[in-house]
Image (cartoon, rainbow, N blue to C red):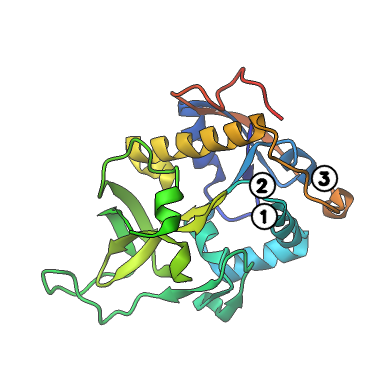
Amino acid sequence: MIAILDYGAGNQTSVRRALDSQGLESVVTADPHLMLQAEGLIFPGVGAAGQAMRHLRSSGLDTFLREWVAASRPMLGVCLGSQIMLEYSEENDMTCLGLLPGKTRLFDAALREEDGSPIAIPHMGWNGVRLEDTEAARACPLFDGIAPNTEFYFVHSYYTEPAPENVIASTFYGQRFCSVLGREGLWATQFHTEKSGPAGLRLLRNFCAWCHNKAASGQDNAASGHNKAAFGQGKAHSGKVAGADGSCAKGAAHA
């Protein structure tokens, strides 16, 4: 099972439907008890960094997420989730989770497209994603079976600027910016995987398969010292997610 974090920031239902289309089991929840039963966590989101961080802090989920990552449990951030994984966002001048070093910055309206035309903000639509020549990119399983420079669907006014060693892929929009970041077990995409057609679904399947294999090998550990009661009872919505390669599919053994 994959948990999809419900923290009042938008597109959890569309992520669940994407997983459903692939036959992958998932639950949308803010309940740490349920999340700790999952093989991995998807951290999606649309909206503003300030509002999202205020909700995470007021619910205690910011602490939960830090402990989840400290315990080496798998996580995939999507769109806003990728931005507030970093230390700081220019949006709302906000201190963020600090799961990875780096900042989120606003696109400069003076930037130009390759044809010389001014960029529009937000960046909205399909754009190519190029894997970089970094150790993080070479070790990343998310793009297995996805052709080089495949286009994914973007909607954002801010972009991530992580530490160079955490850059996995980039995209050009007036400038080259990081569109996929992370390290083993902790990845994030600026584009919407759930709205990116077959390639986005393949990326989600790849993440779920990696989580399932990690759990099956016995490498997962409970978040050490985590006080689950501190978060109260979260509202959960059960679902499934599509998984053509079978790993993480409904009926498989889950931790």
Marking on residue 240: none
Residue at left 44%, top 23%? Answer: 244
Identify residue for label 3.
Answer: 233
Along the polypeptide, which appears first: circle 3 or circle 1? Answer: 1
- Label 2 and label 3: CA atoms lie apart by 21 Å
Residue lying farthest top? 251
Q: Are marks 1 and 2 in contact (CB under 8 Å)?
A: yes
Can you say whether 185 is above or below 171 in the image?
A: above
Mark 1 surroundings: few (<14), some (14-19) or many (≥20) residues within 10 A: some
Along the polypeptide, which appears first: circle 2 or circle 3? Answer: 2
Measured from the top left, where is residue 61 in percent x and y? 73, 57
Q: Do the residues labelled 2 and 3 touch (CB within 8 Å)?
A: no
Q: Would residue 18 be found to the left or right of residue 175 on screen?
A: right
Amino acid at dot 2 = Arg
Marking on residue 73: 2
Mark 3 surroundings: few (<14), some (14-19) or many (≥20) residues within 10 A: some
